[in-house]
Image (tube, helix red, strand yellow):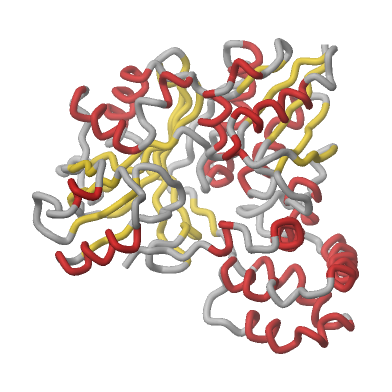
Amino acid sequence: MKTIALITYGRSLMALTMAESVHPIVDRVVGLDTIGLTALSFSKYCDETRTVCEPSEGRKYAKDIAAICEEFPDATVLVMPGFEDMETLARHRSELPSNARLAAPEERSIEQVTPKHHFAKLVKEHDINAPRTELFETEEEARNGPDMDFPVLMKPSRGAGGRGISKVQDKKAYEAYLKQRGDQYPLLAQSLETGEDYCVSALAHNSEVLVLSAYTNLENQPREAGAGVVRETVSTEAFEDDIRKIAKATGWTGVFETDFMWSGDPADTPVVIEVNARFWAGLRHSTLSGVDYARLLAELTLYGELKSEPGMPEIGYRSQVPLAWIPSAVDGAFSESEYANQLSESWDRLKNADGFSLKNFGRFITSLSDAKAAKEALEDVTHRVMDRSALDVDLLAKDDPAAALGALFIVSHLMKFGELPPEVSFDSMSS
């Protein structure tokens, strides 16, 4: 029987890594997203792409994916959620047809770690090392402020990628944060721990951890509260006890990522900041450093066991994610095309900015006022990027350079919804 892999959130670099990982063990890879022009749509590891509704539509989103599964009645369909929709699909697993195999933990497991205030209860019950945390379920509860000294870390119970998280220095800053958040509750106040962030990734089966690895961000972009762009693999020894407690307490099967704060001193104890029931931004780093989580998860989902060796992470392995890959990929096209003459000022401002970011790129994309002209520019970019010999292996596969064009999903989103996608328009609230 043939196996078809459906990979969601096709705009992301995580989806690219997932497609590259599962491509050798399936017969066809189909990329899914709410928009076109995604990274997967340009990747050699993806055979076709489809559009579906927004994951926020819950049951309808699951039914859209179910309908695609039903197009392959004589195949086993591996559904691999690329990001936060792992939780959504786990909740609506019953909507999927009998030929579908969902690579996600059970809903009852996920509900113990997300939203964040659920996890706050779990750590107390199972003696997991975590910062002191207070939960405010209503505005009235939050009004008096946390019963701990400032500064504190404030975070919404739901959200990924640092959205809504802020370090507040004093009562005045706390009141400003509440005003900015409006009626978005529950909120959590967390004691501010010293040390560095550590990302610990794991794959578990029936409560038992099969493999885990860890990395720390040596450099972020932007420097304050930004995504990691220089990562280093480190030993998991300091984190293993808590990771195993989490897997056992939740009955976990699948992947999860846990954020720790730690000084790096063996005499100190790392503390768990949060658990994410999804793949993580540094998935490619984890894969390159020795553990192919996407392939292992696919095998576990399809066969109920691992067919490959789990692998051992290479301690000390470093990777770099050059955020300037977007202008380097499209610079030649825009600088020499007629369309670029209309945009020269904004393009030059983007190229010469002090540090490249998706937000800057988003500002440039807002200059696209003519769909026909944008299409011409895209065709020119495609031609030029296909001629590139390679991109940094820590961002994309060396033999898959055209996937760089996935940055233009921003154009697709703008044309479909009339606004920038959240990946670009998000303003960090961290201070």
Relative vertical location of residue 20 with respect to residue 303 in this rendering, above or below: below
Residue 280 percent across, percent down from the top left: 50, 42
Work out whether residue 288 or residue 336 is closer to the camera in this orientation and state it.
336
**Foreground of the two, 312 or 258:** 258
Name the residue located 23 percent from the left edge and 51 percent from the top edge.
Answer: 263
* Residue sitting at x 60%, y 37%: 57
Residue 160 relative to residue 259: left or right: right
- Numbered circles on residues, count: 0
Q: Position of residue 341 (x, y in %)?
A: 82, 87
The quarter of the rendered structure image containing the C terminus is: bottom left
The correct choice, above or below, for 47 with respect to 381 in the image is above
Quadrant where the N terminus is found in the figure: top right
Residue at left offset 85%, top offset 12%: 74
| Along the viewing direction, whichever of 297 and 161 lies nearer the viewer | 161
Question: Is residue 120 depicted above or below 383 in this figure?
Answer: above
Instruction: Say which quarter of the image contains residue 329.
Output: bottom right
List x then y, in percent, for residue 393. Answer: 66, 53
Place residue 88 in its image quadrant: top right
